[in-house]
Amino acid sequence: MQQKKEVKIKKTWFARIKSLFVYFLLFLVLGWGVDLWRAHSMVSGKAPELITMSVQNKQIDLLAMSQEKPVLVYFWATWCSVCSVVSPSVDFVDGGTQVITVALNSGNNKRIQQYLHAKKYDFSVINDPKGTIAQEWGITVTPTLFVINKGEISAVTTGFTSPFGMWVRLFFSKFS
């Protein structure tokens, strides 16, 4: 009797793990599908030229930076709720990677600098107060992340992304 009970418990746990795995795969496939659908309006191939000053008064030349190693370009906004979850990950990844961020419709440079200081973010930020850079890149949703390698867009994702997801995209961009 005891042995039958143990077998039933094992089958129950196996069935639960199997169900979780199926749900996880479904979640991944749906996420990729949404990313593909959203990305159709965004630029692809060669990255648009982006030479400007950051709110921290640093000269930024995206195409030149991407010749050395891949660059993560992060479009976000101070008012974006999902960005408030992704931005700490971007700040974390910034420690060992080249990161450029573009703040969309988030106010003037002083307001953005205050926001960065309050959140203790160290990443470089380009202010896009009227959304002109975002429009040139075809951004329709925040957050959006691009990986640029040697001037070419090698990955695009929208919505929530983990540090691991960012690193994987940066790593595989070297092979595309």
Image (tube, rainbow, N blue to C red):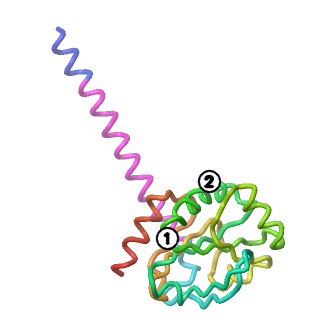
Question: Residue 131's quadrant in the figure?
Answer: bottom right
Which quadrant holds the N terminus?
Answer: top left
Within 10 Å of disc 2 (Cα), the crowding (few <14, some 14-19, many 20+) is: some
Label of residue 159 in the image: none
Amino acid type, mark 2: Val
Q: Is residue 106 above or below residue 57?
A: above
Residue 53 lies, in percent from the top left, at: 71, 84
Q: Is residue 166 above or below residue 82?
A: below
- Image point (24%, 25%), residue name: 10
Which quadrant holds the C terminus?
Answer: bottom left
Label of residue 97 in the image: 1
Label of residue 85 in the image: 2
As measured in the structure, the alpha-carbon distance from the residue carrying label 1 to the one carrying label 2 is 19 Å
Q: Secondary structure at mark 1?
A: loop
Please tell me which residue lies in front, 10 or 161: 161
Q: In this picture, which residue range is highlighted in magenta?
A: 10-37
Would residue 25 appear left or right of 141 to someone viewing this image?
A: left
- Image point (44%, 58%), residue name: 164
